[in-house]
Image (tube, rainbow, N blue to C red):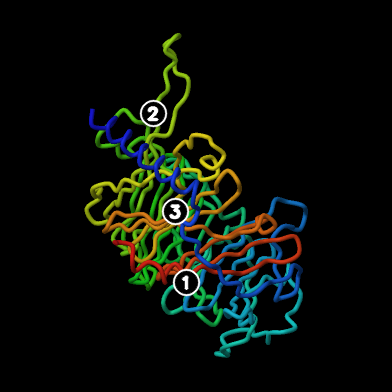
């Protein structure tokens, strides 16, 4: 059977790679990180609140986006949006005055004054979350609407609670996007917010029946929608009996559609009792769903992640799925944490169908809170939360992507 032979060949390959890496970890390239700046914890305008929400509730999201060396951070606990340079200089802030003190560093601006640069403006944020920035530095921020604006949609089996706010590069509130476009109905839970090369905003939502994806042009008009149902995920071409599970979804790097990373599992049957004993990982495929035709492209088979730590300990590594981290510059980005806590990322070139694996240094003390972001050219930025400060770093994947096809 072709599927079985393919699986055996893939397993033999990854075990061989693991064996080689066991004796020489240099087989995996170490990508140097650059420490850019740190941000202290607190309530001042140049500080973050990563962990504590007033009233003792669970922490809200803190997310970041980087564009042209400028960092945009949405801090849910503090209900504010920060703009910082790559040196950590605070350039601008939009904040909820009920949860933040008056700014001391920035000049507070009210109304459409036209003032640019180091300014602070008020906006009644509730729970800012996912964030994206277009080429004109228009900022798109997920926001949760007040209770009285929330509703339940029986068709999608989802609570409609979220919108996407738009701010100009100077922090001026412009409008908000809902399902129909500017001023539309709130979205279901937003799992991802992306920008295409054409500055289209892509909103990915989770519903009771699956996932809904909305595309908006730069003016905020709805371009198209796509629905991916849980019970209609594409089957593995060589073995339709495998069980599909959607592990991640993101906008395609060229803006043509969406990329679905689907993991496939095989049922384990107890030979003595002939009953189902569980499932085991079989393979991962990446599918591109074209937004115009609604058709899937030929799937891309993604190599499994193999533990170097297990191999070095003399154990037989068990191949498992990479986590889907996003797309950029014609590639899929994957991440995984090894059994010894080491962090690995991989780049899968969609044209050459080749994968390169990299080791990233992240200290255990920096894992109290993490938020990662990919820029269009492939720079991986991160907020790493320690007990005493948040560290903003990046890894220049863009400098190593030229040789993916070799």
Residue positioned most to the top: 273
- Which one is closest to the eye, mark 3 or mark 1? 3
Could you say which disc has been placed on residue 390 in the image?
none
Q: Earlier in the sequence, mark 3 or mark 1?
A: 1
> For the point 42% across and 22% down, which residue is it?
268
Mark 2–mark 3 distance (CA, rounded to whole Å): 22 Å
Q: Which residue is mark 2?
A: 266
Q: Quadrant of the C terminus?
A: bottom left
Task: Select label 2 or label 1 by which is in front.
Answer: 2
Q: Earlier in the sequence, mark 2 or mark 1?
A: 1
Quick one: 61 or 113, which is closer to the camera? 61
x, y percentage for residue 50? 69, 61
Q: Which residue is mark 3?
A: 334
Question: Marks 3 and 1, how far apart in space?
Answer: 22 Å
Choose top left, top right, bottom left or bottom right for residue 54.
bottom right
Q: Is residue 232 left or right of residue 92?
A: left
Viewer can see residue 186: no
Residue that carries the numbered disc 1 in the rendered image:
133
Task: Judge from the rendering whether residue 243 lies leftward or rightward of residue 373; answer left or right.
Answer: left
**CA distance for labels 2 and 1:** 40 Å
Q: Is the N terminus in the top left, top right, bottom left or bottom right quadrant?
A: top left
Contact (Cβ within 8 Å) of mark 2 with mark 1: no
For the point 54% across and 82% down, the residue is: 170
Given contact means CB atoms under 8 Å apart, are the residues at marks 3 and 1 in contact? no
């Amino acid at each position: 059977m072709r599927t079985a032979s393919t699986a055996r060949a893939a397993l033999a390959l990854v075990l061989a790679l693991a064996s080689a890496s066991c004796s020489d970890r240099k087989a995996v390239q170490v990508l140097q990180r650059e420490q850019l700046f740190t941000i202290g914890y607190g309530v001042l305008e140049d500080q973050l609140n990563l962990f504590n929400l007033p009233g003792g509730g669970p922490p809200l999201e803190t997310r970041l986006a980087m564009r042209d060396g400028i960092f945009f951070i949405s801090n849910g606990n503090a209900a504010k949006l920060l703009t910082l340079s790559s040196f950590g200089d605070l350039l601008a802030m939009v904040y909820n005055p009920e949860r933040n003190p008056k700014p001391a560093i920035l000049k507070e601006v009210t109304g459409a004054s036209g003032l640019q640069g180091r300014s602070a403006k008020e906006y009644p944020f509730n729970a800012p979350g996912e964030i994206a920035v277009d080429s004109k530095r228009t900022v798109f921020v997920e926001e949760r609407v007040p209770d009285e604006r929330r509703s339940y949609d029986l068709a999608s089996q989802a609570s409609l609670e979220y919108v996407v706010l738009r701010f100009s590069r100077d922090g001026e509130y412009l409008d908000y996007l809902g399902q129909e476009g500017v001023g539309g109905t709130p979205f279901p839970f937003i799992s991802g917010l992306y920008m295409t090369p054409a500055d289209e905003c892509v909103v990915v939502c989770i519903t009771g029946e699956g996932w809904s994806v909305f595309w908006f042009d730069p003016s905020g008009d709805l371009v198209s929608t796509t629905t991916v149902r849980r019970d209609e995920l594409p089957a593995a071409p060589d073995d339709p009996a495998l069980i599909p599970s959607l592990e991640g979804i993101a906008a395609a790097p060229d803006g043509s559609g969406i990329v679905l990373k689907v993991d496939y599992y095989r049922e384990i049957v107890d030979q003595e009792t002939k009953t189902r004993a569980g499932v085991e990982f079989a393979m991962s495929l990446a599918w591109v769903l074209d937004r115009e035709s609604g058709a899937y492209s030929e799937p891309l088979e993604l190599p499994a992640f193999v533990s170097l730590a297990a191999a070095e300990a003399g154990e037989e590594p068990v191949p498992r799925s990479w986590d889907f981290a996003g797309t950029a510059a014609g590639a899929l980005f994957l991440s995984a944490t090894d059994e010894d806590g080491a962090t690995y990322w991989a780049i899968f070139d969609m044209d050459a169908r080749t994968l390169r694996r990299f080791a990233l240094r992240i200290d255990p003390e920096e894992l109290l809170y993490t938020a990662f972001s990919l820029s269009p050219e492939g720079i991986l930025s991160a907020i790493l939360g320690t007990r005493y400060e948040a560290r903003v770093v990046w890894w220049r994947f863009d400098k190593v992507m030229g040789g993916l096809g070799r």
